[in-house]
Image (cartoon, rainbow, N blue to C red):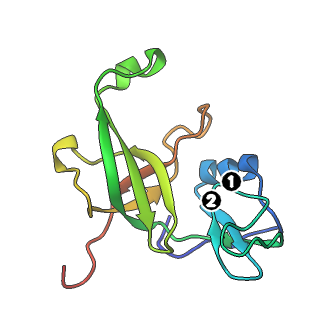
Amino acid sequence: MTGAPAAVSGGGALTIKEFFEGVRAGRLVVQRCTACGELAVPPKRLCPACHGREWERAPLGSAGEVASFTVIRVPPGRQAAEAPYAIVVVRLTEGVSLLGRTTGIPLDALRVGLPVRFVPPADRTAEPVVITFAPGARPPGA
């Protein structure tokens, strides 16, 4: 996926199922309040900023930075073979935050402020769908 948002089909409110179907397909699509422009993820019925109830779908780019992280060393049973791994909170350029996992980033290289980018899940058939972030490009002059 490039940093440019993909086209969005459909309109109006978004469901959690549709959000994760987009993630599975390599797209990040959220809701934008038509009254005030506030972005909402996960999807909501009521805008937290203005209490509006009308939404449109808004594609997001892939770029962001790590806002927080933790390393899981003793995971739940079915993820035991994957440990250790990192869970990150990523603040996307558009201002929304997503929880996900990292790929291609050594655990000792993780830090708050690290540039990352959303990438499609390696296994697009896995349940649950996992939002995944890989190393991102450094901004010019950084």
- Crowding at dot 2, Cα within 10 Å, few <14 / some 14-19 / many 20+, comes out as some
Residue name at image x 49 percent, y 72 percent: 95
Percent across and percent down for residue 38 are 64, 75
Assign the C terminus to one quadrant of the image: bottom left
Instruction: Tell me the CA gap for discs 1 and 2.
Output: 9 Å
Percent across and percent down for residue 54 are 83, 72
Residue name at image x 53 percent, y 41 percent: 130
Q: Which residue is mark 2?
A: 41
**Are the residues flagged by discs 1 and 2 in contact, CB closer than 8 Å?**
yes
Under mark 1, the amino acid is Phe
- In this view, the residue farthest toward the left is 108
Looking at the image, residue 115 lies above or below residue 107: below
Looking at the image, residue 87 lies above or below residue 89: above
Quadrant hosting residue 114: bottom left
Q: Which residue is mark 1?
A: 19
Dot 1 or dot 2: first in sequence order is 1
Percent across and percent down for residue 19 are 68, 53
Quadrant hosting residue 31: bottom right
Residue name at image x 19 percent, y 85 percent: 141
Could you say which disc has been placed on residue 32 in the image?
none
In what element is the residue under mark 1?
helix
Locate residue 128 relative to residue 104 in the image: left or right: right
Under mark 2, the amino acid is Val
